[in-house]
Image: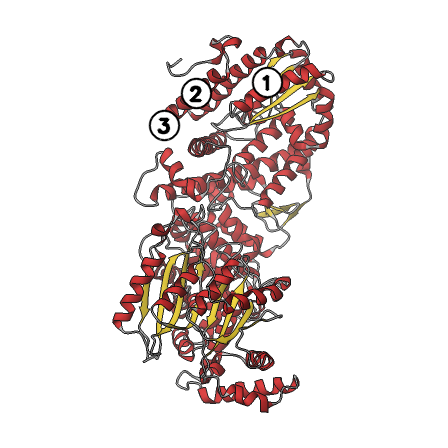
Amino acid sequence: MEANLLAPALLSPDELTLSRCKDILARLQSWLEQRFDAGDDINELVCTRSQHMDQLLTGLWTRHGLHRQPELALVAVGGYGRGELHPCSDIDLLILSREELNDGLSERIGDFVTQLWDLHLEVGHSVRSVAECVAQGEQDITVATNLIEARLITGCYDTFAGLTQATAPARFWPSQAFFEAKRQEQEQRHRQFRDTSYKLEPDIKNSPGGLRDIQTISWVARRHFGATTLGEMVSHGFLSEAEYEELQDCQTFLWKLRFALHTVIRRPDNRLLFDRQRAVATALGYAGEGNEPIERMMKRYYQTVRRVAELNELLLQLFDEAILGHIAMDVKSLTPEFRLRGRLIDVADPELFLREPAAILRLFYQMAVHSQITGIYSTSLRQLREARRGLSGYLCERADCRRLFMMLLRHPGSGRLALTLMHRYGVLAAYFPQWNKIVGQMQFDMFHAYPVDEHTHRVLKNIGRFRDADRRRSHPLCHEISNRLRRPELLLLAGLFHDIAKGRGGDHSDLGADDALAFCLQHDLDRSDARLVSWLVRQHLLMSVTAQRRDIHDPEVIREFATQVRDELHLDFLYCLTVADICATNDTLWNDWKGSLLRELYFATQKALRRGLENPPDLRLRIRENQQQARRLLDHLDTPYEQVKPLWTRFPADYFLRHSPEQIAWHSRHILAHGDSRLPLVQISQQPGRGGSELFIYSPDSPNLFGRVAAALGQKNLNIHDAQIMTSKDGFALDTFIVLEPDGQPVSGDRLSELCQDLALALDSNTAPVVRIRPPSRRHREFHVPTRVHFLEPARPSKRTLMELIALDTPGLLARIGSVFSHLGLNLHAAKITTIGERVEDFFSLTNSEDRPLTEQEQAQLREKLVDELNHEDKM
């Protein structure tokens, strides 16, 4: 025993005072951390804490006189029952009795538990009789599982033996029922994590492929076979020696990860959050510049959970046969090589994949052809794993595999399941080297929810689903386009390569475009198709950036975008790729607002291409058309043109270009009803338009109007996504904002009336709302986004200055920006507000106090003021 580690068993119960026990636990924790840093076996460290806890609890049990109760037992359950305690693991205890406890004994047990809490141990305890345990366990599979792995710490052995007998398989949860319940429990848990372990902030215990999946295997094996270790699965014929060693290796890594996490955060939380990852990576010995330690650790984590998930699926299938007897399921022949067992595809020849690697691709092609297939049979999955690891090169190096791969992509059913399982079982990584490089590639930001390979897989899945009938409602334009594309496999290829070069350094779009071109030519696509795929990869961000950050009502923006797109074929492909990419980035990024922007850009570009880029639109004609359509709408609302005409003479011509006839009619009707009042008019559309709630403000123009509106909306927890800032010829603001709730939805209907009133009061007040500068959130603190200001050079002479601002997303940001504009006497004409994870990328259209573009000196002054104001580190 080392000098700084004191075994509780060496002390008498009388010596186990509160302060002495705290000292013992502190010395134990310090010793564990030292030995962990020194590289000691993680299994021994986890067991050591459990053994020391046994000794401490035994001493305290005696100290409180509970050892004198002849029928009372102290039992470890849960992870503690298995003898596994990480630094902050719960100490799950069952205080077991034969009969109901009297008041005196209950009080002593309470004192015992209270002392454990006073020691700041994470104790979960229950006090029950054997009969109560059985009754509870019969109703709850979690309780039953705890009872099955219960272990006596101290006390009456006969009482504990009674529990063991009462929970034997013959009387309590037979192995068949237990297996079914645990499988359902796992499926439900996986659904809570959307059936993926590839989250950027994973739960290392409960996520698919995590520690809980290994425990599920152990629980089932223990119940049915009486196996107490994973190694016994080898002797029972369920695991090969290599698979057992692989599973042990996976568990060891996950245990190290959990041990380090608990050491860093000092509480029982298993979520590997952004603000913990750097410290955990350091504790595990990962080194490097910048985020390299985190990326290396997370890559190892993703590779590990994929291996666990594979082995978990393999073993649960084998258990299904052994325990439920499903081996005699209905078997049908698909081809001479493949057969269907129930709904699982199986290989007829156990050596097929080893002998013919191209058969791996034929397997997945059959999955695309036969929609009833839901997975791969256990023996075939095992053969696939062995063959994949035995490959001497990448499958794409073989001509027969390239032909089969393109056959698969061209099949309409490829996106249903085949590509998903090729990703899950490492076949894409075995097919071509570029995919192998992005497996588990971390994306350290708040924008992406998945590593690169999982994100790309989701893009492919989205593309495959666009053709389905159920996508007609959620993505109608993608559904329409996808079903008319002559070569839909080109879209899949673009999705496959759009992020393939991330993590290599340099521009991933350019590098990926080069890779895509070479891949397409290698796979015998003609050069025009290969160039189209390469162009899509190079420009896969173009449509999203243009829609969300540029003024798509500006004809020059549409002309410039259309020039880059070139023709409607490129536009169709790019639109579908953009939607698939956004929807696959995270689970909350897509909303109706983004959908509306992209559709507007698509149709405006389509119109420009059909008209011909050499024929720009006649702006005066468009103004007249918008006015005429608005007049017709107002006529239906019994608003005579004689009233409207003098109002419209006050509006600038640009107003009729940048607003639809419906908006013009809506604004006009409410302004006329408002009369000559100098009070602000605030209206919010009852029917959400353009995917968000449209807010219209008409009031005498005043300094920092934008900043005051932004502050007031911020207080209501609403986000501005778009702004058109205009002033009438007689000095009235005609401002339109698109606002959304934090979840990306339009403003809730029950808030509209109150919101209008509160905004009107805020605008009428001489004092602007207070902008509270709150510290950044836990996640934001992990990211440093230096404030950058760029002024874009217009392609043609312009009356306005377009400014791009990149900064950390913080509360009150827009209000502070508006305050800077006001302080410098600048006029804001339009704004595009884009939040990308932890950072904002906003565009503003500005003029100076003389309504001219900003001079170089004014631009430099504005840049300096914004950087100073938005430097969040100086403001906290």
Q: Secondary structure at mark 2?
A: helix
Q: Position of residue 514 (x, y in %)?
A: 34, 61
Foreground residue among 577 and 48: 48
Q: Position of residue 210 (x, y in %)?
A: 52, 37
User: What residue is shown with label 2?
Assistant: 28
For residue 664, what is the image quadrant? bottom right
Quarter of the image with the N terminus is: top left
Q: Position of residue 662 (x, y in %)?
A: 58, 79
The type of residue carrying mark 1 is Phe
User: What residue is shown with label 3?
Assistant: 37
Label 2 and label 1: CA atoms lie apart by: 21 Å
Per the rendering, the mark at residue 697 is none
The type of residue carrying mark 3 is Asp
Which residue is found at the position 55% from the left and 35% from the top? 212
Residue 125: tell me if it is visible: yes
Which residue is found at the position 73% from the left and 24% from the top? 132
Label 3 and label 1: CA atoms lie apart by: 34 Å
The type of residue carrying mark 2 is Leu
Characterize the local packing of mark 2: few (<14), some (14-19) or many (20 or more) Cα atoms within 10 angstroms.
many
Q: Going by the image, does 171 lie left or right of 276?
A: right
Give the mark nearer the N terminus: 3 vs 1. Answer: 3
User: What residue is shown with label 1?
Assistant: 112
